[in-house]
Amino acid sequence: MITSSKNETIKEIIKLKQKKYRDEMNLFLIEGYHLVEEAIKYGYVKTIITTLEESFEQETIYVSKEVMNKIAFTKTPQPIMAVCYKKINQSVDYHQTRYLLLDRLQDPGNIGTILRSALAFGFHHIIISNDSVDLYNDKVIRATQGALFHLNITIANLKEEIEKLKENQVQVYATSLRNAKSIEEYHNQEKMAFVMGNEGQGVSHEIIDICDGSIYIPIQQIESLNVGVASAIIMYQFKK
Amino acid sequence: MITSSKNETIKEIIKLKQKKYRDEMNLFLIEGYHLVEEAIKYGYVKTIITTLEESFEQETIYVSKEVMNKIAFTKTPQPIMAVCYKKINQSVDYHQTRYLLLDRLQDPGNIGTILRSALAFGFHHIIISNDSVDLYNDKVIRATQGALFHLNITIANLKEEIEKLKENQVQVYATSLRNAKSIEEYHNQEKMAFVMGNEGQGVSHEIIDICDGSIYIPIQQIESLNVGVASAIIMYQFKK
């Protein structure tokens, strides 16, 4: 059992709290029974870190409660964490029927909620712009409640991906008020993609301009819906 | 200009950060230009607190930046806050057509997002169970982005209110999987109310049992949607 947080292995694990090291090592950290269980099921786990005395099929590091407290994100952590492989599909599968694209989203809770809704409504192919908040941020992962392990997520240049989707007969719609038609004027089509925009600024104009059209949800009195709410309504409306 | 946070008036204001005092004094605190503007427009403001040199129609307390930092909720506060009157309608207007009821919601961000969506979809009558998180919690207020000033919100015993809504020909539906029909099987009716449940436990069984029926949103792979997302989809579907 490791009892010192100055242990070299522990120091390496703690580094994964920073995006820089997650990117460098292609690994990320998760915390709690539910997430670790899901990550094991889908083959993401490299190493389990635990204060329990159980044995696991995966490589396991046994640590003291003090060390766990140093590694954990929450103040009263569950007794299990894991180091996971990033298993992002670097290339998008262009032969699917539903895609959700996220343009510069910044709020971890929003991305997490959106990934949960995407799974719920069968939007399994997600493309996140490379200037969005880091998918492997612990707050994003917690908010997904494990949904990220079930989805095909690509982090990419959205403009390039939109062009490729269009080449593959996917209709790509930006959520925006700019030259937009109401959600009620659109019908379900065979292959559809929707772009959701940054919390303050919406979808960027250069992206709106290359999409096949813009779509809005008719609302009263307020300027815009929360992006997690808008994403869910669109995916609910256009689920296959 | 008040420069000491030991000033009696300032001490009274700071007390409003606690629910106990908000309840006792029937007042609450808000922070930032947008919220203060909305609160002024709808007649909620009792006193403005500011580091600006501007004059206002309302009673205004001028404070130093140090005092503002003590009163504010955020680390780098905007230069304006206000003490507001709670103006909750203590009794519900039973002659409306759309109601949203919240059963023991605990997450401030969820309640805030739900109130924004309610305003957007014309659900102007909200009944919050008296064991939900405090509506006047600063995180709730911030998440509403001012929507709470436009809505008719009652904090009450949900069971009693459901009985009264039913007496007034409102159809009341619990969102639940218990004896439920899918959202697609329900049609828009003249007077409808929907009950949304606690983040972990959903709507309580004793409330489900007194409703006219249960409704669920068909989803795949995950157990439940985020309550903010589910509320929005239901209000979008049944908006008048």
Image (tube, coloured by chain):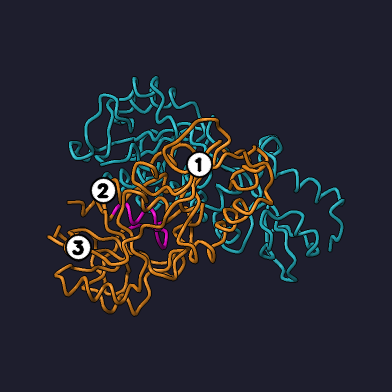
Chain colours: A cyan, B orange
Name the residue type under label 2: Phe
Q: Decide which of A164, B150 is in the foreground and name it.
A: B150
- Sequence order check: which comes first, mark 1 or mark 3? 1
Residue wearing tag 2: B121
Kindly indicate the quadrant of the structure image that contains residue B130. bottom left
Residue wearing tag 3: B192
Q: Is residue A94 above or below residue B202?
A: above
Residue wearing tag 1: B60
Q: Position of residue A225 (x, y in %)?
A: 35, 42
Q: Is residue A195 above or below residue B23?
A: above
Left or right position of B202 against A40: left
User: Which segment did they paint magenta?
Assistant: B219-233
The dot on residue B174 is none
Name the residue type under label 3: Met
Q: Chain of mark 1?
A: B
Whether B227 is among the magenta residues is yes
Provide the secondary structure element on which disc 3 rests.
strand
- Sequence order check: which comes first, mark 1 or mark 2? 1
Left or right position of A206 against B159: right
Q: Nearer the viewer, mark 1 or mark 2?
A: 1
Q: Are marks 1 and 2 in contact (CB under 8 Å)?
A: no
Kindly indicate the quadrant of the structure image that contains residue B69. top right
Distance from disc 1 to disc 3, alpha carbons, whole Å, reads 43 Å
Q: Position of residue A81 (x, y in %)?
A: 67, 58
Q: Chain of mark 2?
A: B
Name the residue type under label 1: Thr
